[in-house]
Amino acid sequence: SLAAELFITSCCHTSSYTYETAPVLTLLEQDILQEMRNLVYSGGHNNDDNSDDDASDNVKTAATIQTINVPGDGLFCPGGSLSNLLAMHAARQMFVKNCSSTLVKEDSDTEFQDDNDNNSNHEEKKSDMEELHSMTNHTSKVPQFQKRKRRRQRPVALVSAEAHYSFEKAANITGIELLTLPTTRNGQIDLKALEQILMDSNRDDNGTTTAATDSIPFFIGLTAGSTVRGSFDPIQHVVQICRRYQHQNNAIWIHVDGAWGGSAIFSKNTKTKKLFQGLDQVDSFTFNPHKMLGAPQQTTMFLTKHKGVLKMANATGATYLFDERKNGAAYDLGDSTFTCGRRPDAIKFWAMYKFYGRDGLATRVDDKVRILSTFAERIQKSDAFMLACDPWPFNVNFFYLPMRLRHILKERSVNTRDTTDPYLPDDVSLELAQVSVALKLRLHEAGEMILPYQPLTTQKADCFRLVLAGKKEFNESDIERMMDLMDQYGQDL
């Protein structure tokens, strides 16, 4: 990956918007995108786990996956935030197109025809957007959808309270209203709240309406590894709920933001693989190999099962670049993006994948799961530490307890080894909030370590967080040193 970054991406100084400007790099990008679509949409990330009956129908053997190329679309993007924006934008454009044609397809594997007629594509998109604006009332900038002549409904996007803040920015850019759903105590999207809002949006009300009954959800952003807690939304259950209502309105675009945890699709750990049940049924998925796997910045992949949807959403047909008469024009990627110039980032992950293979990347992921599980066990057994929440595979959130606070908690019979729903009295939480900041500063100023602290929705005090990114060795001796240093510098706080 480093060699590809230094000698090809930088030294070649080319842009991969057309096949003509970067023929080999364009084909490499198409190749690795196809490999990852096969992995995600053939159920290859979960090919030996048949515990879910609904998911098992789509499960293929590894040998079959290697021989079947799953149709779809995809791009390498400059970061997960842009990928989430791309997902919301593509979903919005599909929603508009469905509204314009008044056609709702039960089959979500939509293929958009790419006839290379840039002018007709541009005019069609212009017409769709004019219709979108015609749905807008005079008092709101939010598009309105006339549903069966009952009432005007606003298209809205849904995310959970644990979702990345980039969804809020994406909603601001696209002009879409964003509704935030609550989460359970472990950080997963609240399925009851999701079902309620979908039920309300389909209700035939002639009387008083609410925010939910006035809205029509067209997009939901799920999380595979939230930034702080590390939580994974239950993909399969969300898919089932959304399908239950899609026959009454436009099919809801389901996007999975795996910027942090998405690289775990390579895992061979049974428990980890279960986190991705239903992934092969979502509309789009993004993950950042530059995070967990350690590819050079920036290496972010966006995948979708809908062939041609990115050109449908983005193409403007600038003929000085995109001309069907050129050799290899069918491979051009630039008109599928927001941008013009594109760094050939794909080669960084392509090189890593070819060198390590799926087994090598699986080892890198599963080693992190193993050592973080060991760390969580050490935290749970120590009187000087306490888990801040039930740990997920790639994030361990915890508190350091100075000597005096240990005595206070013991006197009050507070169980500091509870992992399912750790509890701290309010006065202790207030003190721990100061302890976390003070200890971080002491360790930093001493040159020992830089350890992040951050808020957690279920705790009133900021807690410490350990995650392992990239190809860095971290073993049990590192765990011992880390915990010893924290106790050395913090026990008198």
Image (tube, rainbow, N blue to C red):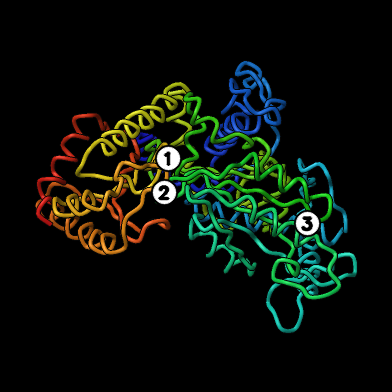
Q: Earlier in the sequence, mark 1 or mark 2?
A: 2
Who's the residue at 56% across and 39% down the image? 26
Q: Where is residue 305? Give x, y as percent.
A: 69, 40
- Graded by Cα atoms within 10 Å as few (under 14), some (14 to 19) or many (20 or more), the crowding at tag 1 reads many
The quarter holding residue 193 reads bottom right
Q: Earlier in the sequence, mark 1 or mark 3?
A: 3
Q: Nearer the viewer, residue 118 or 239?
A: 239
Q: Is residue 401 left or right of residue 1?
A: left
Q: Earlier in the sequence, mark 3 or mark 2?
A: 3
Q: Where is residue 450? Give x, y as percent.
A: 21, 50
Q: Is residue 461 left or right of residue 66?
A: left
Report if residue 455 is visible in the image.
Answer: yes
Report if residue 344 is visible in the image.
Answer: no
**Image height check: is 444 above or below 357?**
below
**Mark 2: secondary structure:** loop
Q: What type is the residue that disc 3 sits on?
A: Asn
The numbered mark at residue 392 is 1
Q: Is residue 123 left or right of residue 238?
A: right
Residues under numbered marks 3 and 2 in contact, where contact means CB atoms less than 8 Å apart: no
Name the residue carrying label 3: 121
The mark lying in front, picked from 1 and 3, is 1
Name the residue carrying label 2: 229
Who's the residue at 84% across and 62% down the image? 100
Q: What's the distance in space between the residues labelled 1 and 2, CA to CA?
A: 7 Å
Who's the residue at 44% across and 26% down the image? 362
Who's the residue at 56% across and 62% down the image? 170
Q: Where is residue 269? Give x, y as percent.
A: 47, 25
**Image height check: is 441 above or below 272?**
below
**Image height check: is 113 above or below 71?**
below
Q: Where is residue 88? Give x, y as percent.
A: 63, 57
Residues under numbered marks 1 and 2 in contact, where contact means CB atoms less than 8 Å apart: yes
**Mark 3: secondary structure:** helix
